[in-house]
Image (tube, grey):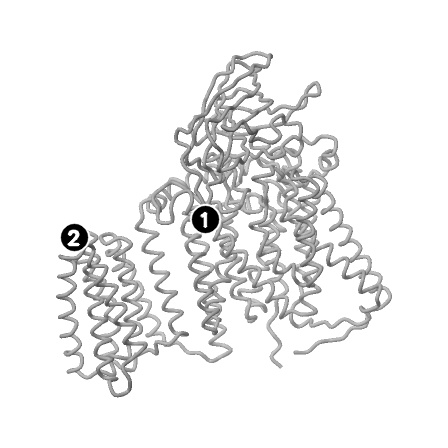
Amino acid sequence: MLSDKKKASPLGAAANRCGAALLLMSGVSGLGVFIATHPLGLGWSALLTCAFCVPMLAHRYAWLLLIPGLSPVIDLAAWTGAIYLTESDALVFAALLAHGVRGLWASAAGSRASVALEPRQWAIGALSLIALLLLSASYLVSTDWWPAWSVWTDPSLLVGYGPLNGVRLAKGMLLSVLLLPLLVQAMREAPGQALRMLLSGVLLGVLLVSLGAVWERWVFTGLSDFASDYRTTALFWEMNVGGATLDGWLALGVPFVLWAVLRERDPIRLGALLCILGVVAYAAFTTFSRGLYLGAAAGGALTLALMLRAAVRQEGVRIPLRAALGWSGFAAGCVLAMSAVFQTGGYRGLAAMLGLALAVFAAGPLMILLERRDLLWAALVAGVACLLSILAMQWVPKGVYLAYGVSVVCFWMVLLLGLGERWATQAARLAFGSVLWMGFNAVLVTWYWSEGSGGLAGALGVGVLFGPLLLVRVRPQYCWRPDVQSGVPVLLVLGAVALIVVTFNTYYVGKRFETVAEDLEMRFQHWSLAASLPQGDREALTGVGVGQFAERYFWRVPDGQFPGSHHVVREDGQHFLRLGGPRHVLGFGELYRVSQRVSPAIEPPLLVSLNARAPEGDAAVHLEVCRKHLLYANECTGHEFKVVGGPAWQRFEFVLDRRDLGHDGGWLPKLTMFSVANASRGRLVEIDDLSLADASGRERLDNGSFEAASDFWFFSSDRHHLPWHAKNLWLHYFVEQGWLGLLAFSLLSGMALLRVAAGGGAAHPLGPPLAGGLLGFFIVGAFDSLVDAPRLTVFALLLMFVAMGLRAPDRR
């Protein structure tokens, strides 16, 4: 690998000092505001800031690990109510501060006299820079920055998605651009180390996101409940009004996990990566997002295709077309056969077949080693064992599962341990007999679970899985070597088969696919309305304003779609909460809630007291305490009451008992929320002096008087989401930033994807997962906005920046 030593000129050194000073000021300013305004107070916010800065200062490339690795899980907005400057923003500011300090220190010490550069590894082209400048200009022009200067005198601007929302969304682009100099330096100085850190960060982030989703389902639905109408949000508070932040993050990350699994050679690390892939696959499946299913599948397929192309071009790997078509047909046959098994034998029947498939893969060479008489001997042993399975099924409770487990243990023990060289033939016989016995037991499992109706489906599944063994017997040249490296693709294919079978044969997912046409029709109507929001030539060019989609939608929305609103109002020195009533048909899931986290161990009975008034006429207020993560209340105790219309404040007190609240979850706690909502259509309700006291008399709410504006208060709309999102990434840019924003983002995203899919970056080892991740992200973006979550914007743009500058490695 070549490197060039470039002497820094006095002008270049001055530019370096100015750049480092700018980054330092940005980091210090951002962290200063974060510490000063954080609802948890100066102590906790300063401690968090130190925790972010220490690793950034300790290692110059730590930010490439920590930003993609921790950003998706460290935000506390759902607890603190602080949505405009979050912990993930502080993490980026810490990286800027550390880089600025390091740059100024190096400049003062004179150590930047010569810098090792490796321009062949990474460099952003002129067209990409132009696209980036255009997108930056679009954000600059289309964002209303003035509300940011009024926050200190009017904290109510921090409530909900108000005038400051444009600055909140533009922050994602701003932070990404500020990180670009750090990326340039890392990729020029040590591209290999930088990319390893980035890859580790991406893997860490997608793992933590997936573990958050697994925890959520474990606590609120159970891991195996795929029938309930519950869509996970993991730790993305930005999904409080819907959106696809979780989908976007997983779409970007799945190809990286797949790529890492296929490239890993160390058995221990390979096992860990396979576990990560399993967790990520579960998290992706339980989003029940059709856009993510399509995006992850397309992104994974593109990653595999590019890896295969690289293997053919660089390593001379050849894959016969006939063999590829044959195994593809076999995989399709497995999907059909396993679908029949799953429809009758459920998860147990499917699991039994997958276990048999692994045994068939391991037993392939036995068909060459064994003579005909050995096969007959093995079949005889299997026949005796099958009789024992039937007896176990009749006489032992759930004995069929015991018989299947014993057959699995027998096969793998004989195959892996063997009986010594002297007894090699006998060991091969026993191993093959165990495979036959396992196949019979798999049929029995399917038959038993289906109460007698699944025998034919089970036999069909076993017949399909035994097909490759018959092929090897007839054509020994097609035999495979069952080692760890060839086992990885087999495991991936079996996992894909299982996902496809479960996806298209479970109740809720099946219902989701049945309504594709109806949902698309509704989406087209929404897109048509969204596209009409910009008015006049100026808005067509620069949009209605960054972050102003919901505000403009409010004024143009059909009357029956307004979801509700909330504001903290100051009047005569008093702060109070104003709730605007929704105009759509109200149900429990359609309420617009203002909520606060309370302890899961809260002890009923609970005393709720508040002042309320309804200035526009009689109104209803809904109160509740629910086991709830972000959306979808699980177990609740609550009360709904009437507020008589008039300007006078009225005092209310209610007792909420334990009815339907359920348990707190024990060692894996169920998050719990107190919520207040306007339950009347189209009328205002004003709330003040909210209090929630538990059985011990302890106050459980913070900022119940709203004197600290939105501190500790959060908001959500569980199921009414269209008013908040354009539901298409490119339409979102057009509505909020006009043709300028749409053109700039299209150029930037298109060049990033083409660079790693078909350009110079495609030959780089990291090109395939970058291309697959970006493709998956853009497919998800075809059905959702995505960039209305700044930390996802930072992550996606960071990967786009890497992709735009990636070059084929120098092999000289």
Instruction: Please report contact status of discs 2 and 1: CB closer than 8 Å, yes or no.
Output: no
Question: Which residue position holds label 2?
Answer: 453
The one nearer the camera, 510 or 370, is 370
The one nearer the camera, 517 or 769, is 769
Going 78% across and 53% down the picture, which residue do you hit? 22
* In this picture, residue 193 sits left or right of residue 453: right
Query: How far apart in space, not on screen, are marks 2 and 1 (Cα)?
Result: 36 Å
Q: Relative to residue 250, is residue 121 depicted above or below? A: below
Q: Relative to residue 556, is residue 425 depicted above or below? A: below
In the current view of this chain or complex, which residue is farthest to the bottom?
422
Question: Which residue position holds label 1?
Answer: 215
Q: Position of residue 648 (x, y in %)?
A: 60, 12
Q: Relative to residue 156, is residue 110 depicted above or below? A: below
Going 57% across and 67% down the picture, which residue do you hit? 759
Q: Quadrant of residue 627?
A: top left
Label drawn at residue 425: none
The one nearer the camera, 165 or 576, is 576
In the current view of this chain or complex, which residue is farthest to the right?
10
Which element is circle 2 on?
loop
Label 1: few (<14), some or many (≥20) within 10 Å? many
Which element is circle 1 on?
helix
Q: Amino acid at mark 2?
A: Ser
Query: In the rendered structure, which disc, 2 or 1, sits on the residue that comes first in sequence?
Result: 1
Q: Relative to residue 572, is residue 716 depicted above or below? A: below
Name the quarter where the N terminus is drawn: bottom right
Going 61% across and 57% down the picture, which residue do you hit? 66
